[in-house]
Image (spheres, helix red, strand yellow):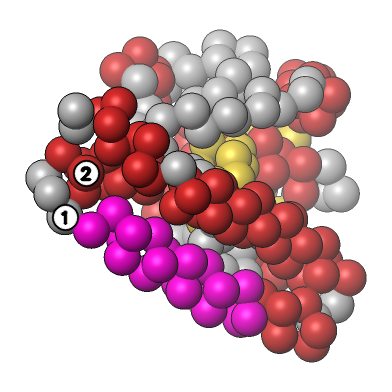
Amino acid sequence: MPEAPRRPTPQARGALETGTAGQGHLSDVYTCRVYTPCTVLPMSIGHTLLGLLESGPRHGYDLKRTFDEKFGQDRPLHYGQVYSTMSRLLKNGLVEVDGVESEGGPERKRYAITDAGITDVSRWLMQPEKPEPYLQSTLYTKVVLALLTDRSASDLLDSQRSEHLRMMRILTDRKRKGDLADQLICDHALFHLEADLRWLELTAARLGQLAKVVAP
């Protein structure tokens, strides 16, 4: 069961604000979290935009449109995210301005990936993602607090089970109607929801034991 999304560390926030993140690589700074009902999937905005630039120079608008089409169906990027990220990539030498166009309107920069950017994308793609065990979850905290305050933890678990089943029905329908990409995304979410449901059943069966431990 996932906990609430983590805030950036003070070091990461400072790097973002000062533009010192990475200095030759993005590290883990340019990261957003794409939410599914049961799991939190790390996605590096910077690395993803860099990867999209490998096919050729693009404007910020084109990068946002392509990102949203391929990765951001549920949480499209804001234009501000794109341009602030590109500004930091430019400062860190991972992209360069390939040209500026106006065509009677606001100036639009066309960005191209540098050799350093290509190297950084390759490094990121080959680096395994750290599994997240979710040893401390919001739901577990709610169960314990319900027991401590003499509220019904059983009702809490029943309510959560109903919400999980509702979301599984939505995802199953989306998977049935979607293309291969949608099917894979939904499978990932559904497998996690199924694991959550097993945890809910196990916890419900052990509430009596848990109550003796946390609220003797």
| 25 or 174: nearer the viewer | 174
User: Which mark, by number, is residue 52?
Assistant: none
Q: Quadrant of residue 168?
A: bottom right
Looking at the picture, does residue 161 appear above or below residue 124? below
Badge 1 amino acid = Arg
Residue 188 included in the magenta stretch of the image: no
Q: Residue at x 48, y 66 (%)?
A: 161
Residue 199, image x, y percentages: 56, 47
Circle 2 packing at 10 Å, graded few (<14), some (14-19), many (20+), is many
Question: Picture coordinates of residue 18 (x, y %)?
Answer: 34, 20
Label 1 secondary element: loop
- Identity of the residue drawn at 54% across and 55% down: 201
- The picture places residue 153, in percent across and down from the top left corner, at 29, 54
Asked if residue 88 can be seen in this view, the reply is yes
Look at the numbered discs 1 and 2 and tell me whether their residues touch, using CB distance below 8 Å.
yes
Q: Is residue 171 left or right of residue 179?
A: left
| Residue at numbered disc 1 | 151
Residue 210 position by quadrant: top left
Q: What secondary structure is found at the residue carrying circle 2? A: helix
Q: Position of residue 126 (x, y in %)?
A: 84, 24
Residue that label 2 marks: 147
Using the rendered image of the protein, determine whether residue 33 is visible from the camera's viewpoint. Answer: no
What segment carries the magenta color? 152-170
